[in-house]
């Protein structure tokens, strides 16, 4: 099985729901499977509002100097770096707006 194929199977969450309906002639049981295709994590873009609840593997980066080799630079005043999955995201401390996204910085 290819890694992309395995990842695709993990993203789809199946939930089996049993619906019980009573008809005029007795009890009818219906089974329905609902597939949730929504990934709970987001891809971040500049200008969006960052919400850590939707970040995969969320961590605040306190020492950006340790990650200079990963293209991180000194955050401007009022911003800080956070990790979301393999991405480094520059987020405003007060409003949560995204100033920059370094995709794949932690690969």
Image (cartoon, rainbow, N blue to C red):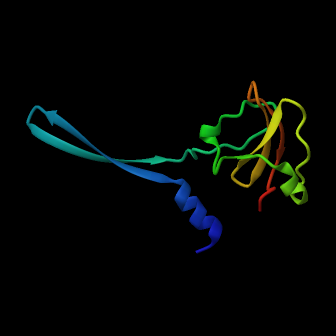
Residue 51, quarter of picture: top right
Quarter holding the C terminus is: bottom right
Residue 24, quarter of picture: top left
- Percent position of residue 5, x then y: 60, 66
- Percent position of residue 42, x then y: 66, 43
Answer left or right for 45 relative to 7. Answer: right
Question: What residue is at 75 percent from the left and 25 percent from the top?
Answer: 94
Residue 91, quarter of picture: top right
> Which residue is the extreme one toward the left?
25
Q: Nearer the viewer, residue 59 or 34?
A: 59
Quarter holding the N terminus is: bottom right
64 up-or-down from 49: above or below: below
38 up-or-down from 21: above or below: below
70 up-or-down from 77: above or below: below
Q: Nearer the viewer, residue 103 or 38?
A: 103
Question: What residue is at 53 percent from the left and 47 percent from the top?
Answer: 37
> Which residue is the extreme one toward the bottom?
1
- Percent position of residue 77, x then y: 88, 31
Q: Nearer the viewer, residue 18 or 65?
A: 65
Question: What residue is at 77 percent from the left and 29 percent from the top?
Answer: 97
- Percent position of residue 55, x then y: 65, 44
Q: Nearer the viewer, residue 89 or 5?
A: 89
Labels in figure, total: 0
Answer left or right for 77 relative to 30. Answer: right
Question: What residue is at 76 percent from the left and 31 percent from the top?
Answer: 48
């Amino acid at each position: 099985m290819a890694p992309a194929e395995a990842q695709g199977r993990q993203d789809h969450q199946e939930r089996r729901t049993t619906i019980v309906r009573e008809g005029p002639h007795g009890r009818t049981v219906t089974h329905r499977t609902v597939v949730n295709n929504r990934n709970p994590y987001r891809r971040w873009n500049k200008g969006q509002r960052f919400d850590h609840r939707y970040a995969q593997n969320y961590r605040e980066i306190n020492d950006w100097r340790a990650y200079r080799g990963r293209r991180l630079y000194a955050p401007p005043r009022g911003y800080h770096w956070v990790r979301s999955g393999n991405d480094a995201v520059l987020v405003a401390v007060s409003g949560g707006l995204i100033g920059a996204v370094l995709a794949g910085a932690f690969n």
